[in-house]
Image (cartoon, rainbow, N blue to C red):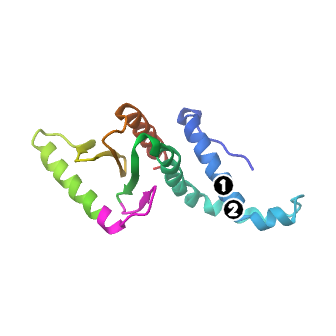
Amino acid sequence: CAIFHNVADGDKYGSLVASEILKVFLWSFENELEKDSTFRDLKAFEEFGSKLPEVFRGCIQSILDKYFASYARLGVRQAVLVTESGETYSTSPIDRLAVLASVEALQHVATDIMSLNGDLPLSISVDGGRTRMAALKIDQAMLIVTCSREAKLTKLSEVLLTCAELAEQVF
């Protein structure tokens, strides 16, 4: 098996995709790999190519897990990515219907406000009592992060942009 990717996509993206492919491959063929360590019959693995679209979709969850779940110490409470088709990915369980309705309402309000200046919203930031929310438009999706007011904004912005760039490459 050989995997090629455009070096212009960067090391982070290449590593993300390779790790996801390996994870899904090992999970899919765990029994076959335990039974036969010589791999004389490779036909058992032929069906894996059809799983690649699923692997790429799984990259979104891996991005959220890697970059936000590990940042709980920075005050990140939750990260959610909602695609235009309504797919949702999150770092913890969510009420999918409520998130979809809230994101749609938020996008409409932001668009209405920005259209007054002949512009479109790319990011939205809301400060609440003890919570801060940041939403970032990514190609075909919206990335929403909630965090404590004590969260370090410079580090959070850096993580948001990294995730946005990786998610954009996946789409």
Write the residue at 9% across / 42% down.
116
Q: Could you classify mark 2 by the number of other residues whose Cα lies within 10 Å: few (under 14), some (14-19), or many (20 or more)?
A: few
- Expressed as whole percent of the image width and height from the top left, the position of residue 5 reads 61, 41
Which amino acid lies under the numbered mark 2 shown in the image of this protein?
A: Trp
Q: CA distance from mark 1 to mark 2?
A: 6 Å
- 93 with respect to 16 (left or right): left
- Expressed as whole percent of the image width and height from the top left, the position of residue 94 reads 39, 63
Identify the mark at residue 27; answer none if there is no mark.
2
- Looking at the picture, tell me which residue is in the foreground, 32 or 1: 32
| Location of residue 92 by image quarter | bottom left
- 124 with respect to 92 (left or right): left
Q: Secondary structure at mark 1?
A: helix
Q: Secondary structure at mark 2?
A: helix
Q: Could you classify mark 1 by the number of other residues whose Cα lies within 10 Å: few (under 14), some (14-19), or many (20 or more)?
A: few
Residue 4 covered by magenta stretch: no
Magenta residues, as a range?
85-99
Which amino acid lies under the numbered mark 1 shown in the image of this protein?
A: Lys
Instruction: Return the residue found at the far left.
Output: 116
- Looking at the picture, tell me which residue is in the foreground, 141 or 92: 92
| Location of residue 26 by image quarter | bottom right
Q: Is residue 84 above or below residue 10?
A: below
